[in-house]
Each structure stands twice: as C-alpha cells, then as structure tokens.
Amino acid sequence: MNFNVFLAILVLVVDTDKAPVDAEDCIDVEKNAEEIRQCCDIPSPLEMENIQQCKEKYQQELGSDVPNFVTCIFDCHARELGVLTGEQDIDEAKMLEMVNQVPDEDVKKLMEQSVKECFKAKDEILEKAKGQNMKCHPLAMMMTECIMHAIFSECETLPNHWKGSEICTQVKNGAKPCA
C-alpha cells in the first residue's frame, strides 16, 4: 500500500459520523486513491519541505509497515515544524499561526474552525491514542485526522474547492473502503 492510498483511507475511515451505507456503496481505495485525495482541493496549512526528510528517516526501518511508517512521518513532521513538543504537547497557537498564512479567507476560516474544534477534543484523542501500539506516538496523526475530517465534512461549502464527482459524493455520504 503506498502513501497516497493510506491518506485516501484516512479520509474514508475518519468520516465516521455518517449514516451506514450498503456494502455495494463501498469504495475501491487502491483504484480511486488520487481522486479521493483531490475531493477537497485546498492547500495544506503546514510547510511541506521537511516531509521528504521524515519519509527518508523512517523508510529503511518501517517502509513496509505502513501504519507505523505513516504515524512516524506525521510525528516527525509535526516536531520539525515545532507544532508537536514532548510526547503529548501540540501547540495550538503555532497551528493557528500557520493557518493564518493561507491566502483564501474562506479556506482560512474553515481551517481555523477545524483546528479549534480538534483542540477541544484533544483529551479524547489522547485517550484513544493510549490504545495504539505504535513505534511513534500517534497524537500528531490523530490530530491531523481530526482536522482533515472537520475540513472534509465542510469542504462542499467552500466555493471552487469541492470536486463533486461520484466518488467524492460517495465519500461525503459515508462510504467505507471495500474489504
């Protein structure tokens, strides 16, 4: 499973507040990963320069262990940006500072709202993280999942950012990955 497929699965899996859908409404993630990733076309508020260094840091050791590999990339990236300090300290002010650099005011407002919403849920996220047996602490990845979910669930309200394809509509309506 490659990194894009894993990110597409994150989009599908974290969208858990939707009504259940029929099995035939599941989505083939391998086939549709790129389209799923592009359903909500907004820029990342985080600088991405160090992501490659983080990938290289863990590639040798964890490359085939995708869940641990991705968790460690998120952890490394957040630490490099100064957003994650210690094991459980995410700097909300630093995150909002990065979000404030987004030029599109509608996107900025949604991102800001999403970050604040997820920081309110931080204790719950930390509790869920305790149950994870990962090489790196999953807090950065789980906060990212929360923020992605919050943005994705409201992306349709952003002018010119939602791709209204059949696959994107299925994801928005709660379709899950096919087994």
Image: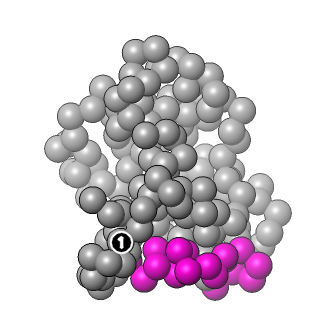
Residue for point 35% across, 56% down: 122
Q: Is residue 167 magenta?
A: yes
The stretch of residues the image draws in magenta is: 157-174
Q: Is residue 166 magenta?
A: yes
* The image quarter in which residue 176 lies: bottom left
Residue for point 76% across, 79% down: 160
Residue 101: % across, % down: 77, 55
Of the 4 image quadrants, the one containing the N terminus is: top left
Q: Tell me the residue that label 1 is attached to.
A: 26
State how the image is colored. one colour
SS assignment at label 1: loop
Q: Is residue 87 visible?
A: no
Residue for point 37% across, 43% down: 139
Label 1 environment density (alpha carbons within 10 Å; few <14, some 14–19, many ≥20): some
Q: Is residue 49 visible?
A: yes
26 vs 57, nearest the viewer: 26
Please say if 170 is above or below 97. below
Residue for point 36% across, 78% down: 25
Please give left or right for residue 41 compared with residue 152 in the image: right
Of the 4 image quadrants, the one containing the C terminus is: bottom left
Residue 170: % across, % down: 46, 79
144 vs 6, nearest the viewer: 6
* The image quarter in which residue 107 lies: bottom right
Please give left or right for residue 65 compared with residue 56 in the image: left
Please say if 150 is above or below 159. above
Residue 158: % across, % down: 69, 80
Please give left or right for residue 25 compared with residue 169 in the image: left
Residue 26: % across, % down: 35, 71
